[in-house]
Image (spheres, rainbow, N blue to C red):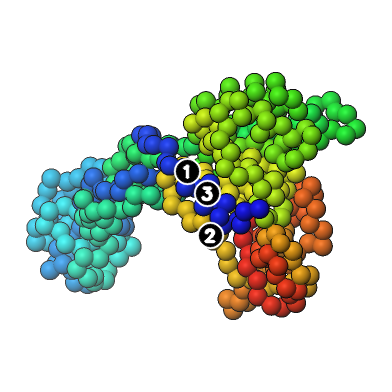
Amino acid sequence: MLDVAVARARILEKLSPCGLETVSVAHACGRVVAAPVVARLSNPPVSVSSMDGYAVRIDDVQEGATLDIIGEAPAGHPSSLTVKKGQCIRLFTGSQIPAGADTVLIQENMRRDGNAVTLLSGGKAGQFIRKQGQDFQKGETLLPAGKVLTARDIGLAAAAGHVWLTVSRRPRVGILATGDEIVLPGDPAQPDSIVNSGAFMVTAFLRSIGAEAVLLPVARDNVESLSAAITQADHLDLLVTIGGASVGTYDLVREAFKPHGLNLDFWKIAMRPGRPLMSGQLGKTPMIGLPGNPVAAMVCSVVFVAAAVRTLMGLPQAAELETETAILGADLKENDQRQDFLRSTLRSQPDGQPPIATPFASQDSAQMNILAQSDALIIRAPHAPPQKAGTLCRILRLP
């Protein structure tokens, strides 16, 4: 059985990014930007007022002074006039600062009488003016290549004048559940039928991290049905199967796929849950075979498939998992030869102390309710000795 880190490395080393595409900035959220985003214009493009008020010369600003109003300049309608001694121009938030003015006095500090205003208080040079380029300048690099774009990044790119962005293409991932016992939610079922929860869960998870995930029709436990399913793999960047990868009489994925070009790398890892994990190539399409138990399928998706999807998106991934420190909330027995991933709750602590991770008493890989209540996975090394509550442990947070 392969070590988990070795298995991750062997999966990732065979993958390369899917390529690039251009999308509108309105549809780029969550995508990986492929090139640095450089400002096409400055923000603000001109100096503007941050308040409703009057554009004046600082030399004219003294309490009790009276200034003539020579015009007004609503936002989007700049004035062509120049403010001279004893003059001012009415402004509004976002109005362009007219020539000759070097400060803005807010309307609350002015008393208007017809076409003149009297200053009720003084002011400072440059106050209430957002200077041209105060936020960013034309030509400035705003976002680095390889960043997953957030809603805030979209706003920044739009403010910088971008209509289109070059991003990594979303990997097309097919999720294929196998088994005669599998039914869809709401379908007529036999007493021993199992709802296809694992495939729905994995599909939702992969979509949440940026994949174009497609839930394929269930393949039955016969070579003909499995072979027919392969015809849908040609257009995929990754095929993920669920079930059929173990050593039982009806675990037929390997047998059915071999005549269609399956090049198997490995099919067993030292991990619990998730020992019957399969990896290889189906023709030109990378393939990962997940265990049939839904909890094991989800844990393996978090540990292996997510890294594969992010690699296909052009994001660097390490063979080692990105874990963090926690405090164990219950005693644990000695571990065997497999690396354990224990479903656990997390309880935060004050003063920046590590959270407390408490494993559930039952770790059965078919218990979906416990998985739904879990916040993280406690990771235990093979042959780990008994461990007492209150000691440090390593966790992998669940998405």
Nearer to us: label 2 or label 1: 1
Give the quadrant of residue 377: bottom right
How many residues crowd around disc 1 within 10 Å: few (fewer than 14), some, or many (20 or more)? Answer: few
Compared with 2, 14 (above or below) is above
Q: Residue type at mark 2?
A: Glu
Q: Residue type at mark 1?
A: Lys
Q: Which residue is mark 2?
A: 320
Q: Position of residue 41 (x, y in %)?
A: 23, 47
Name the residue located 47 percent from the left edge and 47 percent from the top edge.
Answer: 13
Q: Position of residue 125 (x, y in %)?
A: 19, 68
Name the residue located 62 percent from the left edge and 61 percent from the top edge.
Answer: 396
Nearer to us: label 3 or label 2: 3
Q: Which residue is mark 3?
A: 10
Q: Position of residue 233 (x, y in %)?
A: 56, 27
Element class at badge 2 = loop
How many residues crowd around disc 2 within 10 Å: few (fewer than 14), some, or many (20 or more)? Answer: few
Q: Is residue 301 visible to the viewer in this orientation of the structure? A: yes
Q: Which mark is residue 14?
A: 1
Q: Residue type at mark 3?
A: Arg
Q: Position of residue 163 (x, y in %)?
A: 32, 37
Disc 3 from disc 2: Cα separation:
12 Å
Q: Is mark 1 in CB contact (under 8 Å) with mark 3?
A: yes
